[in-house]
Structure formats: C-alpha cells, structure tokens
Image (spheres, rainbow, N blue to C red):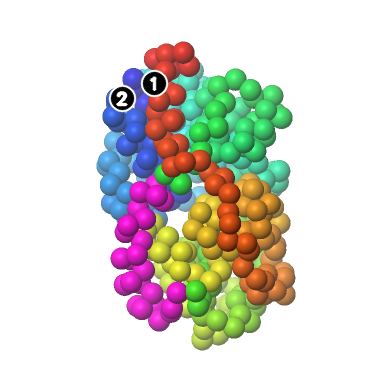
C-alpha cells in the first residue's frame, strides 16, 4: 500500500516518527510537510533528531490567520494528492495541518486515518478542538490513545473503525530514553540549574499569548516563584512578550526552543512543569513530573484524574500555590499503552479485514 502522512507542526513530527518507521517495514510512505512550523528549531531539527526521512513535499505554507493558513494548505495538499494518488492519508493530532489534510483527502474520496483520535477538551473556542472533531468525523480509521478517547468518539456516534492502540508519543519516548541522560548532563550545567531545583515553562496557545492581561498574570506568577525558572519561549510567544513590555526577575531565564530530546531532558529533571501544551502534559505524566496546566480544561483528562496534572487557568496566585503543592503518589498507572502503538497502527492498516488493502 501507499500512504501519505501529512504533518506540519512540532508535536506531529514526534508522532510521525514511530508510525513512519513501522509503516515502511511493509509499505510505501509519502511525507507531506505543510510548513506550518518552518524555522529549524521547530521543524528540521526534529527530523534530524528523530531520524525521520526527508519530506517528499515541503509546502512552505508558514504562518497566518487560521483561515489563511488552512486555505493555503488545502490548495497545496490537494495538488499533491491529485499527483500522487495515495491509497490512504494519515493525519496526526489537532493542528491546522490535520484539518487541511483531512479535508483535502475527504474531498478527493481518499480514506483517512487519524492518529491520536477521540481527544476532547469540550472547549469549541480552541481551534484545536474544531480541528480534531472535524478530522475524527471525516476519518474512517480512528486510532485512539486511551479508552476515554474511544468513548468520546462513541458519544458522537463514531463507532466503526475505532481502535484503542495506546499513545505513539510513549513509543518514541521509550526509544530515546538512553539519549536523555546525555543531553541533561550538558544542558543543565549550561543553564546553571540542578535537577529537581527549577521550574520549566512553555506558553504558546493564543488564549494565553494573545491577551496582554493574561500574559502579565503568568509573568507575575513566574516572577514570584522561589526557585529558578527556565522559560522555553516559542517564537510567536516571544513577539507577544516584547510587545507587552513584560519584565522578568533575575531567576527567570528565557531560552530559545530546544530540540525534542533536549526538551525531554529538561522536563524529566524539572521540579514542576508549567505549560499550556497538550503534549507536555502527557510527557510530564510519563516522566513522573507534576504538571501545572495554564488552561481551564484539558484533553488529557486522565492525567488530572491521576493527580499528576492541575488545571489553574491564568490566575497568578493559583499558579504559585499549585507549584508549591506536594508531589503526588509515585505509583502511576500506565495510561498510554505498552509502547507499541505505532506497530499496532501499522498492523491494523495492513489487515485486509479492515478494508485497507
């Protein structure tokens, strides 16, 4: 079979890596990179670190409003699909690349598989929620990371072609474990921090970054923390911080985005992780680091139920209080499979009984 995998953003490169490796054992795969994340630290570095094949197409879409970006992607993806005639399109996660890939394939009557299907935050103000809902309803194969995700799909009437396979990000995390220690040994001294003695921060969602008052609240919280803060600043977030004129105390260190394995090293050694990223909430759980999520809701509800993730929104005093809470019980149930999700996906897509060959 011939698959076309469509990606465009940093978390999707991570999800693609184990799936691509598994698919290529028996099938042909075409990688279409939309260019949604286009600078080296957000794109090419991930392909290098994860030993991903060079994309067959790089569409160079870049940034823009949601409508502008999605429209450009739709037009460019359609041209590639018309030229290449894949047997199936695979989309990942919940970005505009996911939405555009699913829409383009559906209009051309190409079957769609959605990896990381069934997630719901139940907040339709989030662009990601719209993207994942549409992708699920256009796909005939839904690969869910958890039973909760399967239930969300079922509650919306999607019951055919749905499988709980585990989480592909757990697959790749297990594969790169040996490299994390080496990165930590170099990175932490370079940043002047010690293990379990700093807070790691990322903020990138428009609900936070586009609101000056919200970013000032988050900054106020970071400035009041009593230990070093490493803030890995997304390029778009940095522009907002400069526009808002936010100042930082000496213990807050702003750094450029780092590669995937370096970020995992920073996450694993942190005392706490503060983030609005969905993927980092999950990684924090898998690495055994308590997470404070700068949102009012999450699609990774099982991490909250397990006590390893706290939703705090953007109120500075609540953020500070959450960072100081005791560490949860160290016993953690394995919520995201056995590290074989990509193999299960590849096997399922190869099975004639599933209508895929």
| Residue span colored magenta | 172-195
Q: In the rendered image, which quarter is residue 225 located in? A: bottom right
* Residue 90 x/y as whole percent: 44, 31
Residue 27 is tagged as 2
Q: Secondary structure at mark 1?
A: helix
> Along the line of sight, which residue is nearer the eye, 327 or 199?
327
Image quadrant containing the C terminus:
top left
Q: Say above or below: 238 vs 348.
A: below
Residue 187 located within the stretch drawn in magenta:
yes
Q: Are marks 1 and 2 in contact (CB under 8 Å)?
A: yes
Question: Can residue 282 be seen by looking at this rendering?
Answer: yes
188 over 338 or under it: above or below: below
Instruction: From the viewer's perspective, tell me whether residue 123 is left or right of residue 87.
Output: right
Residue at 31 percent of width and 65 percent of height: 182
Q: Picture coordinates of residue 47 (x, y %)? A: 32, 48
Which residue is label 1 attached to?
A: 350
Q: Nearer the viewer, mark 1 or mark 2?
A: 1
């Amino acid at each position: 079979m011939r698959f076309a995998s469509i990606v465009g953003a940093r978390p999707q490169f991570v999800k693609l890596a184990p799936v691509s490796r598994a698919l290529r054992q028996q099938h042909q795969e075409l990688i279409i990179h939309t260019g949604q994340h286009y600078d080296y630290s957000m794109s090419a570095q991930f392909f290098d670190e994860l030993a991903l094949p060079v994309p067959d197409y790089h569409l160079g879409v870049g940034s823009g409003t949601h409508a502008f970006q999605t429209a450009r992607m739709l037009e460019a993806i359609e041209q590639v699909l018309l030229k290449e005639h894949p047997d199936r399109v695979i989309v990942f996660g919940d970005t505009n690349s996911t939405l555009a890939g699913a829409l383009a394939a559906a209009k051309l009557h190409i079957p769609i598989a959605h990896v990381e299907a069934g997630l719901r935050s139940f907040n339709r103000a989030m662009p990601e929620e719209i993207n994942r809902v549409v992708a699920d309803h256009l796909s005939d194969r839904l690969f869910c990371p958890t039973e909760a995700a399967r239930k969300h799909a079922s509650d919306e009437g999607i019951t055919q072609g749905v499988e709980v396979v585990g989480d592909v990000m757990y697959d790749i995390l297990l594969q790169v474990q040996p490299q994390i220690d080496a990165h930590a040994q170099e990175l932490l001294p370079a940043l002047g921090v010690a293990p379990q003695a700093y807070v790691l921060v990322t903020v990138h969602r428009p609900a936070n970054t586009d609101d000056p008052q919200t970013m000032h609240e988050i900054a106020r919280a970071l400035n009041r923390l009593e230990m070093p803060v490493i803030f890995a600043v997304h390029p778009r977030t940095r522009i907002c911080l400069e526009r808002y004129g936010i100042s930082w105390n000496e213990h807050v260190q702003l750094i450029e985005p780092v590669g995937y394995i370096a970020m995992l090293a920073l996450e694993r050694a942190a005392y706490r992780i503060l983030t609005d990223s969905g993927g980092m909430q999950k990684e924090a759980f898998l690495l055994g680091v308590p997470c404070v999520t700068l949102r009012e809701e999450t699609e990774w509800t099982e991490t909250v139920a397990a006590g390893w993730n706290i939703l705090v929104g953007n109120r500075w005093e609540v953020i500070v209080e959450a960072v100081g809470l005791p560490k949860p019980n160290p016993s953690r149930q394995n919520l995201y499979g056995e590290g074989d999700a990509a193999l299960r996906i590849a096997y399922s897509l190869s099975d004639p009984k599933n209508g895929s060959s």
